């Protein structure tokens, strides 16, 4: 009987972790908004527009990557929870 309780505790733990990663997959870092005025020195631009575009591209890539990785981890925890339930059933 204690082994079944142990498996159910693991099941609950895995389901909580699954829900946490599903929540984390919905979070995003907001894009950078350039509030500085681009200044030129002797006709040479300081390139804040290019920097902002590249930084926002990086942020978008990271958001996509974090979403995918957190969903994969949530799926892994769900599979572990189902395995724990099955183990409790066959014990």
Image: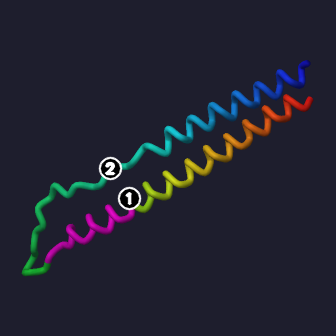
Residue closest to the eye, 9 or 34: 9
Cβ atoms under marks 1 and 2 closer than 8 Å? yes
List the residue tagged with mark 1.
Answer: 59
Q: Position of residue 17 (x, y in %)?
A: 63, 36
Element class at badge 1: helix
* Numbered circle sitting on residue 68: none
Position of 60 compared to 51: left or right? right
**Residue drawn where x is 78% and y is 25% of the image:** 8
* Above or below, 63 relative to 50: above
Q: Whole-percent x and y of residue 3?
A: 89, 25
Pick the front one: 77 or 29: 77
Estimate how packed mark 1 is, as few (under 14), some (14 to 19) or many (20 or more) residues with alpha carbons within 10 Å. Answer: some
For the view shown, which residue lies furthest in the bottom direction?
43
Q: Is residue 4 left or right of residue 38?
A: right
Quadrant in which residue 9 is drawn: top right
Q: Which residues are magenta?
A: 45-59
Q: Quadrant of the C terminus?
A: top right
Identify the image quadrant of residue 85: top right
- Reading the image, the residue beneath label 2 is 30
Q: Position of residue 4 (x, y in %)?
A: 86, 24
């Amino acid at each position: 009987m204690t082994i079944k309780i142990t498996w159910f505790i693991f099941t609950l733990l895995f389901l909580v972790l699954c829900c946490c990663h599903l929540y984390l997959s919905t979070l995003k870092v907001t894009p950078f908004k350039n509030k500085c005025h681009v200044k030129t020195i002797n006709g040479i631009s300081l390139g804040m527009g290019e920097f902002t575009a590249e930084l926002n591209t990086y942020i978008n890539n990271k958001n996509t990557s974090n979403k995918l990785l957190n969903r994969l981890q949530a799926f892994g925890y769900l599979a572990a929870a189902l395995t724990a339930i099955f183990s409790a059933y066959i014990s």
